[in-house]
Image: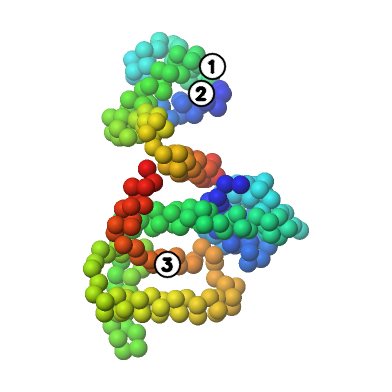
Amino acid sequence: MNELQASTLSRYLEIHNHPTLKFISVDTSIQITRVFRILNGHEMKISEYEKFECSIARKLGGNNPQAMNIKRMADKCQQELSPRSIVEISDLMDRKLKIKSMI
Amino acid sequence: MSPLLLIERLVMESLSRGEKDIKAIAEDTNLKEEVVENILKNLHQNQLIKPTSKGNYGLDFKSLSTEVHNINSPACVNWEVKELLIALANSYFLTPPHRHKISYQGMSLNYYSSPILRVKKVWLTKDEDIIYNSLLNRLDFLFREVSSSQKKRAKEKKSAEQKIIFWGHSQYDKLVDTILAEV
């Protein structure tokens, strides 16, 4: 299983509190046998990857709209804020990721 | 090189007090050994530290002499202060401080265990401003004294046990102007 697929699936399973195959199938509109294969390491198609990511965003959005909107917010910041502000925000994100990679 | 993270600074500060192996750094900084290992990897890549004898690490003074201006530049220290302030605010508001009375030289004092954070918005009269400034001077004096006796203490204490103390002030409109100018 590639790293991106593993990370998406682990986030999906964590966010949905380790759901059943049936739940995943209904939630992502991916056939249950295909879900089973994906969870067992078969490589995902881009369309399947997007379905998992959409579900993660939907779920996060329900509890925390800002978390769901982070990509949209980043786009808006890039369009509207000063270069200095953009650098500050991206530096902060970069530092958070750097800390995450160390722990 | 990007500004050092707080945890990278902590490890650098620990090594500035002498060469150590991963276990000793973890003990001195209260960080997990695997976290220390990752930090050391990064610092070594940036040539700020180097492996020495017997699995020890030490500061790489040769490259530090050229990098020290960068590491302690206002932009980099600004990040350090911001990270400390955010962490202090988060820990303070999540775990309100425990306060108890202690007796010191016949006086009863409130003793605040960490974390503590105080922010006041006040108009000071000229006299009050002078009193406030004299207290700041006393704080400066106290920490100058502490710095001079620090070396002896540093050998017995862990880096992680240092108390982080902030103080400072500004005028409300100046801070607002800074916020407005930065967007």
Is B60 placed left or right of B81 in the picture?
A: right
The image quarter in which residue B59 lies? bottom right
Kindly indicate whether the residues beneath marks 3 and 2 are on one polypeptide chain.
Answer: no
Q: CA distance from mark 1 to mark 3?
A: 52 Å
Co-location on one chain, circles 1 and 3: no
Location of the C terminus of chain B by quadrant is: top left
**For this rendering, which residue is in front, B155 or B61?**
B61
Q: Which mark is residue B6?
A: none
Q: Of the numbered discs in the image, which one, if any, rests on residue B165? A: 3
Residue appearing at x 32%, y 25% in the figure: A58
Q: Quadrant of residue A69?
A: top left
| Residue A47 image point, x, y percent | 45, 13
Element type at mark 2: helix
Looking at the image, the residue that sits furthest to the bottom is B106
Identified at 45% across, 80% down, the residue is B141
Q: Earlier in the sequence, mark 2 or mark 1?
A: 2
Going by the numbered disc 2, the residue's amino acid type is: Gln
Q: Amino acid at mark 1?
A: Glu
| Rendered image: mark on residue A5 | 2
Mark 3 or mark 2, whichever is nearer to me: 3
In the image, residue B181 lies at what x, y percent? 37, 47
- Tag 2–tag 1 contact (CB < 8 Å): yes
Marks 2/1 same chain: yes
Q: Chain of mark 1?
A: A
Looking at the rendering, which quadrant does residue B12 occupy? Answer: bottom right
Identify the chain of the residue marked 3, using the numbered disc in the image.
B
Between B124 and A46, the one lying in front of the other is B124
Q: Is residue A40 left or right of residue A26?
A: right
Q: A96 or B2: which is nearer to us?
A: B2
For disc 1, the marked residue is: A43
Q: Amino acid at mark 3?
A: Ile
**Helix, strand or loop at mark 3:** loop
